[in-house]
């Protein structure tokens, strides 16, 4: 497993991180794996320049559009009960889709880690890194949510 993957799994399990990331995803259109990558670069003393941020957003959009968003939509549709589907069968398929979605996110994180610069100094402010990548990702920067996420991420 990669350093970014391991850090992301640890971060995701920290109190409030998953909920904050999902809120940023659903309410503000942000990409949680991209946000985690930005936080990891800051925490590990990696300085992502404008070209790296742009490339990271391009890679994340490609994974989001081709795999992650369609899988998420399918997983969420399978969450709803359907009288014509047996609950156990529906949940079994939903679990498989969830596993494939998680694998796609892991592969996205691996691609982002490969793109990231080498460590070049002490840790940088996480909020600054989150804001920089969020601005590249969308026209709206959800500063309050990013501030909350920065405060919840582990060191």
Image (cartoon, rainbow, N blue to C red):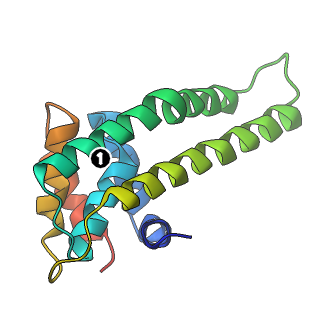
Residue at 63% over, 25% down: 77
Observer able to see residue 44: yes
Q: Quadrant of residue 3?
A: bottom left
* 20 left or right, relative to 121: right
SS under mark 1: helix
Residue at 28% over, 41% down: 57
Quadrant for the N terminus in the image: bottom right
Front-most of residues 35 and 62 = 62
Q: Is residue 82 above or below residue 48?
A: above
Disc 1 packing (10 Å; few <14; some 14–19; many ≥20): many
Count of number-bearing discs: 1
* 82 left or right, relative to 131: right
Residue at 13% over, 56% down: 49
Give x and y (percent) for residue 136. Answer: 17, 40
Q: Is residue 123 above or below residue 106?
A: below
Dot 1 corresponds to which residue? 56
Front-most of residues 86 and 123 = 123
* 83 left or right, relative to 6: right
């Amino acid at each position: 497993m990669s350093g970014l993957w391991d850090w992301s799994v640890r971060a995701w399990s920290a109190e409030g991180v998953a909920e904050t990331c999902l809120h940023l995803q659903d309410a503000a259109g942000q990409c949680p794996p991209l946000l985690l990558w930005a936080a990891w670069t800051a925490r590990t003393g990696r300085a992502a320049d404008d070209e790296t941020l742009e490339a990271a957003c391009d890679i994340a959009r490609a994974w989001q559009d081709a795999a992650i968003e369609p899988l998420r939509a399918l997983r969420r549709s399978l969450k709803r009960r359907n009288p014509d589907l047996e609950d156990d069968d529906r949940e079994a398929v939903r679990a498989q889709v969830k596993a494939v979605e998680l694998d796609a996110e892991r592969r996205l994180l691996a691609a982002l880690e490969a793109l990231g610069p080498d460590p070049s100094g002490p840790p940088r402010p996480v909020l600054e890194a989150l804001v920089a990548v969020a601005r590249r990702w969308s026209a709206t920067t959800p500063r309050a949510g990013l501030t909350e996420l920065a405060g919840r991420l582990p060191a």
